[in-house]
């Protein structure tokens, strides 16, 4: 999980969030959750492996994860700048409810992490037919 | 009369087909066809315009940032947002690095093998190759033992029978004119370029998290927060140092390999300074601002048009005069396809009307391409590095005049020689050299701003969609490695109502218009001699000189014409 492996995870647990692009938190490398980061929904190892010979990855470049390796991320993860409703668990210093995050604490008890996105995003369209034989350019 | 068909044209991005008529050993007519459909414009409709750039840049993974830049500029233009100086510099740095990377990869890995015979390199004398290399460059890697080592590697590949990258070349073709030593030097640098490019592009990872598809653009600025004292900031003294090192490596590569190789190879092929000249009309939107992005007076590459090879006059550019025709493209317009549309009202309605595969020939009197036909004031235009150099030279740009005159002096050729197949190749090398100096000044400027506490990177004025007007329209222009790129966006409420991209390869590879005027590829192929119709190396030389990028030109595809498909993991 990108969120669990993220170098900014300690800031999330401590309740230190970027509130506006370029603000103090952004300059200090705080958590991008409130800027729409989809790290909590993204099951990849980018924070560990990184890109271009272990040089960096999008969150280090100051932008939220868009879960771009996720199947049908274009339906499930967009809009990219909309904050995920709540991410349960791991709140060491403050809980998601104390952060006042939208729907938090209202109806989400018992909803799994992977179900969360679908509660705010449009229902996925049925997949198109599989091509018989596909050439990649 | 014989009809030659090259399909697919390889060593390009995407799927391109060329049909050409041959009479008396020369091309008498030619047709360029993009054989796949994309529809990113359709994917963008209804989305938040602040994320349009994330989708638009996935038009292509080669010049992977150009659509992001054009897209944020279009939305900023629509919503009237100025971006801070630091964001402008970071965008220039990302785009400039892209241009240098793209030109080097194009020259060595996509184009050089049209001029360089890999098989001939085995016959080279390594000691003489070392002499040749030392006469054109100060590169450290120029000893006889170095070239002997490269030669053994090539021999190993050829002896293995697994030619990989070098399979299906026209090796031994009579149009290859380089001596074996020049071939060996070029192949050695082909391999060096592979290693260098993967290192250099880390600059995109520093400033964008990754390449392809760096992820640090924002409508209103960049996400690359700056702070001289925070290691968590994207731009800090440590990352400035890393960027400086990468730019130093780029200068070394461009000056010690790329430029000398282009000049050395070109000097053996002087006939190609009189072939492949094409339309003679050149369009350049201009770019790389040192001030307002909409003020061409501050551009590194001047904005302008040169018509009919007349470099005494530079015409102004008005984006309102850009149109797209579908007379010969497999699309239809809702109000009838006879009327060309401005991109702000542009439509992407695919309607394939070509022959059922497999087929021998396209019906070129009817629709024959997935690429639309862009026109400026009804006129066909060439865009790209050559257009930038021609418009810049005619405009009196100092760095461009110095670069062009310097290269022409070495080649002992007049300015008119630029209007040719090799003129395009030389133009890339010249502008790479200009750009590498600029990268240094931009890194210095960021460093200076950091030192003076000037760290603003984002303008928040219109981030909240509640601050937007009920509707807005805008365009974003960019000089991408392959030429003039424009995005047009129509915003209604909080979402995208319409989106169109008119891209460099659409300008260059587009089919004829309703008046029968040829596109840039089609015009450039006229009169080209073809020694062996079965191995049309000469066609590849001219088509490759434009650096085709068909994914961009036709804007999600599969061969069956379905709009979307789920990629399979093989």
Image: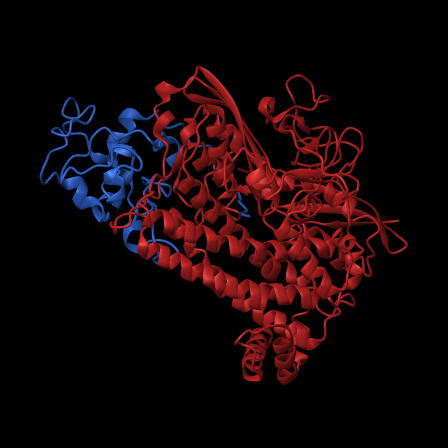
Chain colours: A blue, B red
Q: Position of residue B502 (x, y in %)?
A: 60, 34
Asked which quadrant contains residue B149, the reply is bottom right
Q: Name the residue nearer the viewer: B506 or A123.
A: B506
Asked which quadrant contains residue B553, the reply is top right
Q: Name the residue nearer the viewer: B395 or B5.
A: B395
Q: In the current view of this chain or complex, which residue is farthest to the front? A: B452
Q: In the current view of this chain or complex, which residue is farthest to the top? A: B470
Q: In the current view of this chain or complex, which residue is farthest to the left? A: A93
Q: Position of residue A88 (x, y in %)?
A: 16, 34
Q: Name the residue nearer the viewer: B242 or B192.
A: B242
Query: In percent of the image, x 75 and y 69: which residue is there?
Result: B177
Indicate left or right for B215 with B24 as reference. Answer: left
Query: In percent of the image, x 74 and y 36: which residue is there?
Result: B380
Query: In percent of the image, x 77 and y 28: which residue is there?
Result: B514
Q: Is residue B462 above or below residue B536?
A: above
Question: Is residue B306 visible to us here?
Answer: yes
Indicate left or right for B104 with A10 as reference. Answer: right
Count of all numbered marks drawn on residues in the image: 0
Q: Position of residue A43 (x, y in %)?
A: 28, 44
Q: Name the residue nearer the viewer: B71 or B518.
A: B71
Question: Is residue B36 visible to us here?
Answer: no
Q: Position of residue B203 (x, y in %)?
A: 42, 54
Indicate left or right for B192 with A32 as reference. Answer: right
């Amino acid at each position: 999980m990108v969120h669990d492996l993220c170098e900014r995870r300690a800031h999330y647990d401590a309740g230190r969030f970027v509130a506006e692009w370029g603000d103090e938190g952004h300059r200090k490398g705080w958590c991008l959750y409130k800027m729409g980061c989809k790290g909590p929904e993204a099951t990849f190892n980018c924070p560990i492996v990184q890109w271009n010979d272990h040089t960096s990855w999008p969150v280090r470049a100051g932008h939220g994860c868009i879960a771009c390796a996720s199947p049908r991320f274009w339906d499930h993860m967009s809009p990219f700048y909309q904050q995920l409703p709540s991410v349960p668990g791991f709140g060491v210093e403050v809980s998601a409810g104390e952060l006042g995050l939208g729907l938090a604490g209202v109806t989400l008890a018992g909803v799994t992490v992977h179900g969360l996105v679908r509660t705010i995003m449009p229902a996925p369209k049925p997949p198109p037919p599989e091509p018989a034989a596909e050439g990649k350019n | 009369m014989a009809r030659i068909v090259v399909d697919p044209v390889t060593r390009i991005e995407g799927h391109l087909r060329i049909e050409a008529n041959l009479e008396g050993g020369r091309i008498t007519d030619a047709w360029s066809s993009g054989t796949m459909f994309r529809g990113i414009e359709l994917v963008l409709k209804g989305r938040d315009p602040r994320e349009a750039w994330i989708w638009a840049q996935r038009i292509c993974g080669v010049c992977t940032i150009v659509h992001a830049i054009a897209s944020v500029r279009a939305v900023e233009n629509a919503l009237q947002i100025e971006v801070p100086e630091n964001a402008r510099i970071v965008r220039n740095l990302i785009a400039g690095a892209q241009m240098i990377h793209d030109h080097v990869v194009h020259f060595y890995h996509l184009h050089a093998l049209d001029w360089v015979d890999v098989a001939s390199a085995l016959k080279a004398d390594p000691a003489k190759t070392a002499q040749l290399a030392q006469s054109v460059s100060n590169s450290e890697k120029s000893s006889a033992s170095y070239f002997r080592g490269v030669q053994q590697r090539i021999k190993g590949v050829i002896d293995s029978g697994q030619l990989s990258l070098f399979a299906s070349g026209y090796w031994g073709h009579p149009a290859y004119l380089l001596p074996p030593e020049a071939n060996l030097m070029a192949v050695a640098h082909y391999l060096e370029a592979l290693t260098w490019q993967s290192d250099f592009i880390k600059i995109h990872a520093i400033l964008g998290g990754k390449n392809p598809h760096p992820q640090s653009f924002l409508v209103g600025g960049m996400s690359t927060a700056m702070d001289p004292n925070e290691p968590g900031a994207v731009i800090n003294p440590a990352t400035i140092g890393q960027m400086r090192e990468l730019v130093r490596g780029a200068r070394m590569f461009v000056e010690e390999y790329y430029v000398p190789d282009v000049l050395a190879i070109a000097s053996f092929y002087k006939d190609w300074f009189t072939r492949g000249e094409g339309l003679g009309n050149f369009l350049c939107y201009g770019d790389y601002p040192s001030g307002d992005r909409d003020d061409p007076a501050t551009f590194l590459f001047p904005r302008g048009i040169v018509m009919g090879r007349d470099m005494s006059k530079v015409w102004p550019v008005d984006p309102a005069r850009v149109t797209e025709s579908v007379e010969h493209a497999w699309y239809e317009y809702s109000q009838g396809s006879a009327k060309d549309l401005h991109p702000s009202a542009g439509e992407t309605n695919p309607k394939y009307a070509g022959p059922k595969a497999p087929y021998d020939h396209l019906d070129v009197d009817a629709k024959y391409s997935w690429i639309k036909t862009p026109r400026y004031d009804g006129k066909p235009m060439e865009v790209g590095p050559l257009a930038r150099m021609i418009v810049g030279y005619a405009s009196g740009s100092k760095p461009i005049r110095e670069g062009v005159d310097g290269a022409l002096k070495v080649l002992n050729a007049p300015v008119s020689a630029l209007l040719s197949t090799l003129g395009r190749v030389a133009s890339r090398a010249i502008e790479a050299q200009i750009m590498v100096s600029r990268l240094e000044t931009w890194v210095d400027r960021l460093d200076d701003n950091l030192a003076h506490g000037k760290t603003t990177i984002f303008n928040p004025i219109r981030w909240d969609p509640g601050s937007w007007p009920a509707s807005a329209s805008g365009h974003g222009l960019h000089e991408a490695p392959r030429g003039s790129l424009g995005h047009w966006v129509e915003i209604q409420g909080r979402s995208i109502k319409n989106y169109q991209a008119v891209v460099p390869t659409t300008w260059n590879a587009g089919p004829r218009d309703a008046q029968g005027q040829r596109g840039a590829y089609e015009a450039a192929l006229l009169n080209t001699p073809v020694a062996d119709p079965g191995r049309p190396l000469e066609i590849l030389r001219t088509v490759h000189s434009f650096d085709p990028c068909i994914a961009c030109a036709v804007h999600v595809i599969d061969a069956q014409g379905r709009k979307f498909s789920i990629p399979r993991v093989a």
